[in-house]
Image (spheres, rainbow, N blue to C red):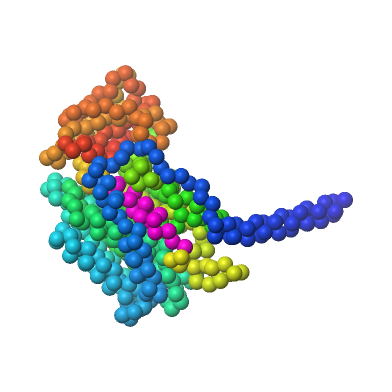
Amino acid sequence: MEGNEERTSSLTRRQALTGAAVLGSAATVGGRGAITTGTRKTGGSLPAAHVREILDEISPRNIEQTILGLVSFGTRNTLSSQTDPQRGIGAARDWLLQQFQQVAAASKGRLSVGLQSYLQPAGSRIPTPTVITNVVATLPGTQPESAGRIYVVSGHYDSRGTNVLDTTLDAPGANDDASGVAAALEMARVMSKRQFDATLVFMAVAGEEQGLYGSNFYATQAKAQGLNIAGMFTNDIIGSSTAQDGKRDPFSVRLFVEGLPSTPAPAEAAIRLDGGETELPPRQLARYIKEVGENEATSMNVDVIVRRDRFGRGGDHIPFLAQGYPAVRFTEWREDYRHQHQDTRLVAGVQWGDLPQFVDYQYIARVARVNATALASLALAPATPSGALIDPTAQVIDTALKWSANTESDLAGYEVLYRPTTDPDWTSAVTIPVGKVTTFTVTDTYKDDYFFGVRAIDSGGNRSPVAAFIIPGT
Ligand SMILES: [Zn+2]
């Protein structure tokens, strides 16, 4: 009896597996005639007219040309040839430098471009010491008080196949991550025609697949020089709107943001004691991107995922987080694992590999527009207020807040906000314009029951991200 049951159940399991296999191939067929599930974002507040002009100029055609250009070098594995003029990462680096230099030439000297190279010692994915080179384009801020505030947007131009150490097979990397590089280059082209208060850095890094090396070098150098990086976005695998199951959502992008810091500084550990773990700067940056990036001009939904990255995986924002800089990752709404980290080949009649045919240039342009809206808004706005302290000592049903004065010459004032501790963001928060002050008491509002924040506004109505009152002080 028991034996029969066992046979029956294993038969059932086999049948179930066969069924799954049939479903799997049906989904593959479905992939060709993808089912669109996502809808265009409506509502949200439209960006200012001068930001909408930037969005209008972002061109899917230019993005396509950059991706096809990068794919043409065969492989861009970090360990591939750095001297062959036709094939390998060296040829891709030189071509990218040229592309950024052309943008710089058209910017009337606003944008400056350079290479940042260093010798990476051998490691588990670096058999011998290897030169790693980032292509870095800088658009200096034009407001003296804000030029030292920097926002970085990057993609990685290195690629890989199934074996990360293979330097000879094709590794087209159209999605991972020519898509992110193409977005950064296109933003550099459009934004370098304009002026921003704060400084913007558009970057293509290498060594990502070998261990986030290029971005780590940039972030550690920045920290050593005391640079104020107020926000960093990596765009990595932003190329496709079609998932492995054939579903398509051309109007959603995921934004990964750290939950708890992986290596919390003592101050951050103390913040957790008072329940401020959702209120640290990376989370405020993600809220800001969602608030300004979701609207009818971008058509995009920004799905904030409160995880540093996908399970067991990493990206170029992580070295920035490790240096204490707020950093986030954009990635397409669902990945197709047949088209990343895979050699180009046919598997049971299905094409695998990270090829341009699986990339949606209109979608990448939309993701770039979300980035550009956020970067422009951040770089036009005052700095996030610093020194935000909440007075925990007064045993009254009033909440006393103070912060340090911003230094921008066009500062108009501040808004104090508060929201229930279970609300995920500030969009429904109570918002109080408080003028140009550095202290404010919210009356009849019990400090234990809300998250409080403050943001700065300039005379043009540009708003900074929110600084949260999570540090007790009197
Ligand atoms: Zn990648």
- Regarding residue 280, the answer to whether it shows in the image is no
Q: Residue at x 22, y 30 (%)?
A: 402
Q: Position of residue 215 (x, y in %)?
A: 32, 61
Measuring 37% from the left and 52% from the top, which residue is drawn there? 367
Question: Does residue 373 belong to the magenta stretch?
Answer: yes
Q: Which residues are magenta?
A: 358-375
Tell me if residue 447 comes above or below residue 306 in the rendering: above
- Residue 167 within the segment the image draws in magenta: no
Q: Residue at x 25, y 31 (%)?
A: 415
Image quadrant where one finds the C terminus: top left
Query: Which residue ends up furthest to the bottom in the rendered image?
Result: 84
Taking depth in this image into account, of 31 and 122 the one nearest to the observer is 31
Front position in the image: 369 or 176: 369
Percent position (x, y) of residue 456? 22, 36
- Chief secondary structure of the magenta portion: helix
Please say if 192 is above or below 326. Answer: below
x, y (%) of residue 361? 39, 59
In the image, is 118 to the left or to the right of 296?
left
